[in-house]
Image: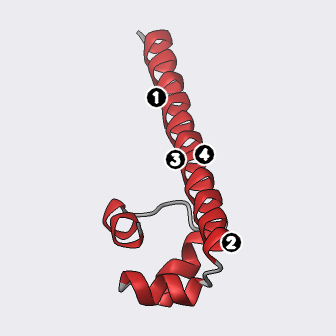
Amino acid sequence: LCILSAIADNANAEIGTLNLVIKLKIKEAVVLRLKKICSERNYTLYKVSTLSGVSYKSVYSLERSDRKDMSLSLLKKIV
């Protein structure tokens, strides 16, 4: 039973790590897309925040690598 428990714990840890990697990849893709749109339309992050009604701090924080999450409601406002 101890072996099965250890295997289950290891599997749960790997799933948690995989979920984090997927979230980070999605975040990276969203940030890259936002940068591309801003470049194409000649928008600053301040303009994005003004047009979307989202605070500049929130828009700016999307690009920061230490922020690992983003809310769907925030993304819907920006898009």
Which residue is disc 4 drawn over?
25
Please state the horizontal and vertical placement of residue 32, each as a whole percent of the image: 65, 58
Find the distance from the CA under tag 4 to the CA under tag 3.
5 Å
Which mark sits nearer the N-terminus, 1 or 2?
Answer: 1
Indicate which disc residue 39 carries. Answer: 2
Q: Residue at x 47, y 85 (%)?
A: 49
Q: Does dot 3 land on a helix, a strand or a loop?
A: helix
Find the distance from the CA under tag 2 to the CA under tag 4.
21 Å
Which mark sits nearer the N-terminus, 2 or 4?
Answer: 4
| Dots 4, 3 in contact, CB < 8 A | yes
Residue in front for this viewpoint, 78 or 25 = 78
Which mark sits nearer the N-terminus, 3 or 1?
Answer: 1
Q: Residue at x 60, y 61 (%)?
A: 31
Q: Does dot 1 land on a helix, a strand or a loop?
A: helix
Residue in front for this viewpoint, 14 or 48 = 48
Neighbor class of circle 4 (other Cα within 10 Å; few <14, some 14-19, many 20+) is few
Residue in front for this viewpoint, 63 or 15 = 63
> Which amino acid type corresponds to the residue marked 1 in the rendered image?
Asn
Residue 75's place in the image compared with 55, above or below, is above
Find the distance from the CA under tag 1 to the CA under tag 2.
41 Å
Q: Does dot 2 land on a helix, a strand or a loop?
A: helix
Which residue is disc 3 drawn over?
23
Which mark sits nearer the N-terminus, 2 or 3?
Answer: 3
> Which amino acid type corresponds to the residue marked 4 in the rendered image?
Lys
